[in-house]
C-alpha cells in the first residue's frame, strides 16, 4: 500500500511548498477539507497508522494552519483548517480562510480533495460551496463520512443514501475504530491518482 507512512513537512498560511520527484515533476497533492471538528486529524493518524502524526483536539478550530505531510516522497497530503464554528478569534478565522482560498486557487498540483463529512450532520453551505468549486475546477472530490461508528447500520445506510443523492457519487464511510477503512480509502485514492 502506498500510504503506509507519512512525515510531517510544515505548517503555514503562505509560502506553500512545491515538492518534485527525481524527474522534476511536482508531487500530486491531496487536500483534506471539512467543517471544524469533523475528524481530519484523527483520520490522518488512523490512515497512516501513526498515533501522533497530526494533532487532535475536541475543541473546534484547533487546526489554524495548513499542515503538509509528505508520503514516501510521492504525494503531499494537505490538512486544511476546518470551516464553520471555531473556538478562535474572528481575525484568526478570517486569516486561515483566506489562506485556504489562496491554496486551493493557486495549487497547480492539487489532484484530489477529500471532503470529510460528519455522518451525524447535514451538509453545510460551506460543504456545498467546496463541492461546487471542485466541480467547476474539475478536481476530483471524494466524500468521506466520518464518525460512522456512532451510527447504527440502518442510520448509516440512510445517511449514505442521502449523501449520495446530494453529491451524485458514493460517499465512503470511515471510522477510526475500523482498520479496514484505511484499505478502502487507499484503494479509492489510488484509483483517482
Image: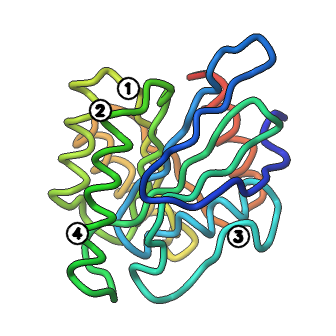
Q: CA distance from mark 1 to mark 4?
A: 25 Å
Mark nearer the N terminus (2 vs 1): 2
The location of residue 107, given as percent across then percent down, is 42, 32
Residue 57 occupies quadrant: bottom right
SS at badge 2: helix
Q: Is residue 41 left or right of residue 168?
A: right
Judging by the rendered image, the residue that carries numbered circle 1 is 139
SS at badge 3: loop
Judging by the rendered image, the residue that carries numbered circle 3 is 177
Mark nearer the N terminus (3 vs 1): 1
User: Which of the pair 141/167 is nearer the observer?
Assistant: 141
Look at 26% across and 79% down and name the residue there: 85
The location of residue 87, given as percent across then percent down, is 33, 89
Assess whether mark 1 and mark 2 are in contact (beta carbons under 8 angstroms): yes
The location of residue 151, given as percent across then percent down, is 48, 72
Number of the front mark, 3 or 2: 2
Amino acid at each position: 500500500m502506498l500510504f503506509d507512512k507519512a512525515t510531517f513537512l510544515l505548517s503555514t498560511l503562505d509560502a506553500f511548498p512545491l515538492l518534485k520527484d527525481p524527474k522534476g515533476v511536482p508531487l500530486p497533492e491531496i487536500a483534506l477539507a471539512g467543517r471544524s471538528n469533523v475528524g481530519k486529524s484523527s483520520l490522518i493518524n488512523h490512515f497512516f497508522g501513526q498515533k501522533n502524526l497530526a494533532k487532535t483536539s475536541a475543541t473546534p478550530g484547533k487546526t489554524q494552519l495548513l499542515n503538509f505531510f509528505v508520503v514516501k516522497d510521492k504525494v503531499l497530503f494537505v490538512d486544511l483548517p476546518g470551516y464553520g464554528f471555531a473556538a478562535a478569534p474572528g481575525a484568526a478565522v478570517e486569516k486561515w480562510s483566506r489562506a485556504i482560498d489562496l491554496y486551493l486557487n493557486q495549487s497547480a498540483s492539487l489532484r484530489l480533495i477529500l471532503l470529510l463529512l460528519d455522518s451525524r450532520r447535514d451538509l453545510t453551505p460551506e460543504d456545498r460551496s467546496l463541492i461546487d468549486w471542485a466541480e467547476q475546477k474539475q478536481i476530483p472530490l471524494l466524500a468521506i463520512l466520518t464518525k460512522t461508528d456512532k451510527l447504527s447500520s440502518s442510520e448509516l445506510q440512510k445517511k449514505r443514501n442521502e449523501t449520495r443523492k446530494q453529491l451524485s457519487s458514493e460517499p465512503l464511510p470511515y471510522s477510526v475504530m475500523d482498520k479496514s477503512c484505511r484499505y478502502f480509502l487507499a484503494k479509492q485514492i489510488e484509483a483517482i491518482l
